[in-house]
């Protein structure tokens, strides 16, 4: 398999366990394990203090090893967005995965139902249409899954993001009623995620968006209770707004994912004094491969880091600005009096958006002891990289 | 290996050879093989008519199978940007690879030198610094490569892109002289690529940029000849400007890559009447997974296609506009009176930029007989996917 030879080459070339940071080839995705551990502890303490379930979003790291680490730090399981992410993580040992997204294709639902049948892990899923409920029940039936409440189903309502999710209120009641028509399904609660609010820069904007989302959830819960349906759980929230959902009294489970690594986009948000202060733990190690008059060029472009949420920030050396050099290059200029880095000099970048950045890499290099003089402790596989189905 | 199990699942789930297009899971990267073959033939005829060498840029497709196909259609070999792309493609059987980019890291240069030593393929490389020349020679020496002219070296000059490449003229002469100081190296010519010009929308802007680039190459060649150095070859050009380089009388080799697939960004350029008319041959097959009032949501976001050059165009159904729904979703709205697509309906997208889009996928599904009713002829591996080193 070419993957295998590529993997072997990668292991041989990019990072050796026990070797110093300086030996990591570039560009590579590097985790500051000490910073990540502090982020894990802060999130665990936050969820515990608020009496909330924590189900981090593994769409961000796509790694079974990191999912298990989060579970050891108090998470009840993880979320994913895709059927094949769920299959990749459960094949790699994760035991509780929630697909916080709609799955409509019968072929995907059959793959999922066969995994439910195998009973190696607990799967749950979101729905926002009658067809989604019917097709899910048909797939479970086709896979001979018939036990009562074999699969948890969350009804997704649109609380302001304007993407997936049915309208709050009466439409949600109709959909919940449809879930109850299938004994193989268990109505587990509401999926309520205001994704757009995560990236509102000011705390006031985020507070207003989550206040509207809270009203939408409360109204839907009242309509469901009036129709005789209890809502076991409301799940949602992200790293940008989690303190607001936690304070709302409505959400019972937090789905934040980026807290583990923190990216430049989240760092650009006005900080929420009620939220934990998470640290950057994910970096792209790159180096200068061309040096010209007035600029230097590093070997990390947008095949090394995603730029959907802006260019990466230069972490070290300080005083540099990164601008796009295309797929394989980054153009570095000094934004002060400092000198340009030399040819071959290491440049540490903080990606603009961690989720699609991780999805570009097959491995993450975990470093203990800091970026300056640390040691490679482990190489973490991105198990679900490229699992789009 | 998780790669292997993921690969097996992918093969099992996403596309079966001999099966109809309708069975391809979503989101998947699909090649219209008939359109690709026409693009191959048009490019071969263009290069032949101009008496130019064709060395397509494999950074775009990262596939040994497609590189071999291009070589069977008249290419002398391929270009890549990264050491590990060169190693992945040559391990998979490609016999002539030019790294049209600078490599400075001694560890990368040693990997490359060891591959040169193995003599399974011909490697060549670009340089833009004295240190680059010295380190390359040292690595070849360390790998016991000592035959005269064992490796071709192109000196890259900046012809207006403002990224890598030394200044045209005297600085280039100094660098060429340094190459001649190492008998293991052969001065193969000049690398002159005006990347920025590829995306100038109007033909007049592109013509002006390549006219300036032509003067820079001519001036450098004259300075080299005055110093007693002949320039064996000038290599460069891209899909957006190739007819201009071809008409210049200066370039002897074309490095165009995107012509094979054509993307939405190149299609947005004002067409050059002297260039072949290339067709879209690369598509993302996606499907509607949520349908709301006023919009539908498809299952392809920017983990399925790169958005550095804009959102994908909706190829079919017509009359739809794609806007970003984030990493895993695309929001579809009608831009005319037409209806929204139904839940589960297939939506074909043309990626904004093919190179980083291909790099998101482990496989490309080759379809014969058109997107509407064709059959899966083969599944093409993206051998160098994620090879960043």
Image (spheres, coloured by chain):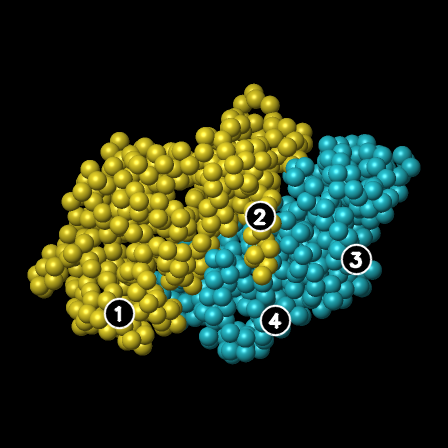
Chain colours: A yellow, B cyan
Foreground label between 4 and 2? 2
Marks 3 and 4, the one that precedes in the sequence: 4
| Nearer to the camera, A386 or B113 | B113
Per the model, the C-alpha gap separating discs 1 and 2 is: 43 Å
Furthest-front residue in this view: A18
Marks 1 and 2, the one that precedes in the sequence: 2
Q: Dot 2 corresponds to which residue?
A: A10
> Judging from the image, what secondary structure is the residue with disc 3 in?
strand
Instruction: Name the chain under label 1.
Output: A
What numbered label is drawn on residue B33? 4
Is mark 3 in CB contact (under 8 Å) with mark 4? no
**In the figure, A137 relative to A40: above or below?**
below
Instruction: Name the chain under label 4.
Output: B
Q: Dot 1 corresponds to which residue?
A: A133
> Judging from the image, what secondary structure is the residue with disc 2 in?
helix
> How many numbered circles does the render carry?
4
Residue at 17% from the left image edge and 48% from the top image edge: A250
Left or right placement of residue B111 versus residue A54 in this view: right
Q: Dot 3 corresponds to which residue?
A: B53
Residue at 52% from the left image edge and 36% from the top image edge: A18
> Judging from the image, what secondary structure is the residue with disc 4 in?
helix
> Judging from the image, what secondary structure is the residue with disc 1 in?
helix
User: Dot 3, crowdedness within 10 Å: few (<14), some or many (≥20)?
Assistant: many
């Amino acid at each position: 398999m070419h993957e295998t030879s590529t993997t072997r080459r990668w292991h041989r070339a990019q990072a050796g366990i026990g070797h110093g940071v300086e030996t990591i080839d570039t560009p590579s995705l590097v985790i500051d394990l000490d910073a990540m551990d502090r982020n894990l502890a802060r999130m665990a303490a936050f969820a515990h203090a608020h009496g909330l379930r924590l189900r981090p979003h593994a769409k961000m790291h796509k790694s079974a090893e990191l999912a298990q680490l989060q579970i050891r730090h108090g998470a009840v399981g993880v979320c994913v967005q895709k059927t094949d992410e769920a299959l990749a993580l459960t094949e790699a040992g994760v035991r509780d995965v929630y697909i916080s997204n709609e799955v409509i294709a019968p072929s995907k639902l059959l793959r999922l139902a066969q995994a439910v049948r195998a009973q190696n892990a607990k799967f749950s899923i979101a729905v926002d249409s009658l067809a989604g409920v019917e097709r899910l029940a048909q797939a479970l039936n086709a896979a001979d899954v018939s036990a009562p409440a074999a699969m948890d189903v969350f009804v997704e309502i649109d609380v302001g993001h304007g993407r997936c999710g049915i309208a709050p209120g009466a439409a949600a009641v109709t959909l919940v009623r449809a879930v109850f028509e299938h004994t193989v399904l268990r109505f587990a609660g509401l999926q309520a995620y205001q994704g757009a609010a995560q990236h509102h820069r000011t705390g006031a904007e985020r507070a207003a968006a989550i206040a509207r989302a809270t009203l939408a959830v409360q109204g839907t819960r009242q309509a469901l209770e009036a129709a005789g349906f209890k809502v076991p759980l409301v799940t949602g929230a992200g790293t940008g707004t989690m303190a607001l959902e936690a304070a709302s009294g409505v959400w019972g489970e937090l789905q934040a994912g980026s807290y583990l690594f923190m990216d430049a986009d989240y760092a650009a948000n006005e900080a929420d004094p009620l939220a934990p202060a998470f640290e950057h733990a994910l970096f792209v190690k790159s180096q200068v491969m061309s040096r010209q008059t007035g600029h230097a060029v590093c070997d990390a472009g947008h095949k090394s880091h995603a730029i959907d949420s802006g260019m990466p920030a230069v972490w070290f050396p300080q005083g540099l600005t990164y601008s796009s050099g295309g797929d394989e290059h980054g153009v570095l200029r000094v934004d002060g009096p400092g000198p340009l880095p030399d040819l071959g000099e290491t440049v540490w970048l903080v990606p603009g958006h961690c989720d699609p950045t991780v999805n570009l890499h097959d491995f993450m290099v975990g470093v203990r002891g800091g970026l300056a003089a640390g040691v490679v402790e482990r190489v973490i596989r991105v198990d679900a990289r490229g699992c789009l189905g």
